[in-house]
Image (cartoon, helix red, strand yellow):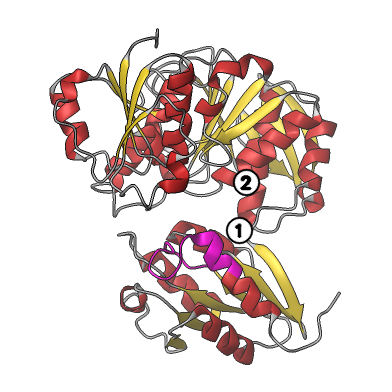
C-alpha cells in the first residue's frame, strides 16, 4: 500500500497507537490520532508522537469519517465503537495495527495466540531462534508494537509476535509463516459478545494462510484441537499426553518432534527450569516452531533448559519454613489458574479474585475442593466465585491482598504452597497485573521467618 498523502485516522493514543501513527507519519501519510482521554491525561503519550500527527482528544468521534482513506485501531478500542461502525457503513477500511505493519514486512512472521501461554511461548521461541544465530524481532502484544520496526524489518530473519484477540479483530490480509493457537478457554467475555465470537476471532490468525505455511495447535485443548481450517495449511499438533502423527509430543519424558515421518529427540523435560505443566506445553510448541525453522535439537534443548519463566506467571517468590510462595498474577482467567493448580501435588493455599471478565468459574469448583486446603478471596468477583463452591467451607473474604498473604501464611504448613492465581483481571484494585504481582511479592518478602536456600 502507498501511504504518501493518504488521510489515515489512528484510534487510540497508547503505545500501539503511537507506534502506528509514527510509522505512518514517517511514510508521509497525513495522520490524525484520536483518543477518549483528555489532553492532560495523555500528556506523556502526546509528547512521543511525530510532529506532523494531528491530535484530537476527549472522544473517539469524527464529524466526517469519509474524509479518511483508512482507520487503524489500537487493541484497547472496542470493535463495537460507534466510530468504527460508521466507518464500516461507509466502506472505509478498518485495520488493526498488526494488519498495517504486516503489509510492509517481507520476513517470515511467527504469530502466537491463545488464552494462556502467549508471552512464555513467544519468549521461548525467540530465544531458540536467537540461540541458533538468527536475528529475531520479538514484539506485538509484548515489548514494542510491530509497526515500530515495519519499515526496517528486512534486518531481521524472523518476526515473532504475541497476538491477542483484540489485535485479531480487524485483520484482513495478515498472513503468518507459522501461526500458533496454544489453547482457547473463556476470557474477555466482558468485551466479546460470547465465547463463540472469541473463538472465531482467535481463528482469524490463520484465515489467510496457504499450503506453504504452518498452523500449530494444542492437541490437548478441546477447542484448539477441534479446529479444521478450510485452507490447505500444514497443520501440526503438540501434545503433553499422547503421541501425534505430525508435531511434538513426549516419550519417556523426552520432547520428540515428528515431521514428514522423521523423528528428532530434542531432550528431557526434566531439564526445564520453568515450573508448571503449562510450561511443558509451551516448550513443546516452541520446540516444534524451532524445528520448522531448521533449529538443531541441541540448540532447542539448550535454550529451553535455560529459560526460567516470566515475571508474574508461576513465579517462585520465596520459601519460608518449608512453605513456598508462588506469584501467578498473570493468571487472569480460569484456564490459567487451573493449569497452575494442576502443577502442584502438595496442598494449596489459594488467593484468588479480582475484576470479573464475564467468564464461568464453575471449572474451578471441583479442583478447589480436591486440591485447595484454604481459599482467600479478594476483589469484586468474590460473590461470583463463592457461588461455584457449594459445600466448600474453607473460604474467607479478605479486603486487601496484603491481608490475604498474612492469613495464607498462618494457614500454611511446611510442604505446602501459597499460590496467588486470581482468575480475574486486576483493574478493580490495581493498575495492571504487574502492579498486583509486585504487591503480592512485597507482602511475601515482608513476612517473618527463615528462608530455605
Is 450 located above or below residue 129 in the figure? below
408 up-or-down from 318: above or below:
below
Label 1 close to label 2 by CB (< 8 Å): yes
Nearer-the-camera pick, 145 or 231:
145
Look at 58% across and 40% down and name the residue there. Answer: 143
Task: Tell me the quadrant of the picture where the C terminus can be found.
Answer: bottom right
Q: Which residue lies at the image location 42% right of the left edge and 71% below the top edge? A: 429
Provide the residue span drawn in magenta: 421-438
Side of 253 relative to 421 (left or right): right
The quadrant in which residue 52 appears is: top left
Q: Secondary structure at mark 2?
A: helix
For label 2, the residue is 120
Q: Considering only order in the chain, which callout, 2 or 1, is on the residue closer to the N terminus?
A: 2
Viewer-side residue, 73 vs 345: 73
Q: Residues within 10 Å of mark 1 (few under 14, many from 20)?
A: many
Q: Is residue 439 left or right of residue 452?
A: left
Q: Residue 105: x and y, percent?
A: 54, 16
Q: Quadrant of the N terminus?
A: top left
**Which of the 4 image quadrants contains residue 452?**
bottom right
| Residue 305 percent location from the top left of the image | 80, 46
Q: For residue 215: magenta?
A: no
Pointer 1: what residue? 313
Amino acid at each position: 500500500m502507498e501511504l504518501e498523502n493518504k488521510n489515515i485516522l489512528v484510534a487510540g493514543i497508547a503505545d500501539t497507537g503511537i507506534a502506528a501513527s509514527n510509522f505512518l507519519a514517517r511514510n508521509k501519510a497525513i495522520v490524525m490520532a484520536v483518543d477518549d482521554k483528555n489532553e492532560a491525561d495523555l500528556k506523556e503519550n502526546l509528547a512521543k508522537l511525530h510532529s506532523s500527527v494531528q491530535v484530537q482528544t476527549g472522544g473517539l468521534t469524527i464529524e466526517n469519517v469519509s474524509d479518511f482513506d483508512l482507520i487503524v485501531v489500537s487493541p484497547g478500542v472496542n470493535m463495537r465503537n460507534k466510530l468504527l461502525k460508521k466507518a464500516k457503513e461507509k466502506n472505509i477500511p478498518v485495520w488493526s495495527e498488526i494488519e498495517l505493519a504486516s503489509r510492509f514486512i517481507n520476513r517470515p512472521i511467527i504469530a502466537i495466540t491463545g488464552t494462556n501461554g502467549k508471552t512464555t511461548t513467544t519468549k521461548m521461541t525467540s530465544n531458540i531462534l536467537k540461540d541458533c544465530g538468527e536475528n529475531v524481532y520479538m514484539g506485538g502484544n509484548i515489548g514494542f508494537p510491530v509497526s515500530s520496526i515495519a519499515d526496517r524489518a528486512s534486518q531481521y530473519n524472523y518476526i515473532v509476535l504475541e497476538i491477542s484477540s483484540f489485535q485479531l479483530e480487524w485483520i484482513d490480509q495478515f498472513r503468518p509463516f507459522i501461526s500458533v493457537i496454544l489453547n482457547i478457554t473463556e476470557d474477555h467475555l466482558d468485551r466479546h459478545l460470547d465465547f463463540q465470537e472469541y473463538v472465531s476471532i482467535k481463528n482469524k490468525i490463520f484465515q489467510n494462510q496457504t499450503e506453504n505455511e504452518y498452523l500449530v495447535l494444542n492437541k490437548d485443548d478441546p477447542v484448539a484441537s477441534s479446529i479444521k481450517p478450510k485452507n490447505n495449511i500444514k497443520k501440526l499438533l503438540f501434545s503433553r499426553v499422547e503421541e501425534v502423527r505430525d508435531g511434538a509430543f513426549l516419550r519417556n519424558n523426552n520432547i520428540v518432534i515428528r515431521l514428514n515421518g522423521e523423528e528428532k529427540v530434542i531432550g528431557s523435560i526434566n531439564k526445564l527450569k520453568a515450573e508448571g505443566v503449562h510450561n511443558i506445553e509451551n516448550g513443546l510448541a516452541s520446540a516444534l516452531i524451532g524445528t520448522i525453522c531448521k533449529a538443531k535439537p541441541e540448540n532447542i534443548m539448550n535454550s529451553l533448559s535455560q529459560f526460567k519463566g516470566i515475571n508474574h506467571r508461576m513465579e517462585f517468590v520465596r520459601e519460608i519454613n518449608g512453605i513456598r510462595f508462588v506469584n501467578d498474577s498473570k493468571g487472569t482467567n480460569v484456564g490459567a489458574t487451573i493449569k497452575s493448580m494442576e502443577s502442584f501435588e502438595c496442598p494449596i493455599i489459594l488467593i484468588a479474585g479480582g475484576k470479573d471478565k464475564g467468564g464461568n468459574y464453575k471449572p474451578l469448583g471441583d479442583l478447589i475442593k480436591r486440591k485447595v486446603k484454604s481459599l482467600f478471596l479478594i476483589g469484586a468477583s468474590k460473590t461470583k466465585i463463592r457461588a461455584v463452591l457449594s459445600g466448600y467451607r474453607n473460604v474467607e473474604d479478605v479486603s486487601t491482598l496484603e491481608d490475604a498473604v498474612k492469613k495464607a501464611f498462618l494457614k500454611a504448613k511446611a510442604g505446602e504452597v501459597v499460590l496467588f492465581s486470581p482468575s480475574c483481571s486486576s483493574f478493580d484494585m490495581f493498575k495492571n497485573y504487574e502492579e498486583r504481582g509486585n504487591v503480592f511479592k512485597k507482602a511475601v518478602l515482608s513476612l517473618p521467618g527463615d528462608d530455605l536456600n
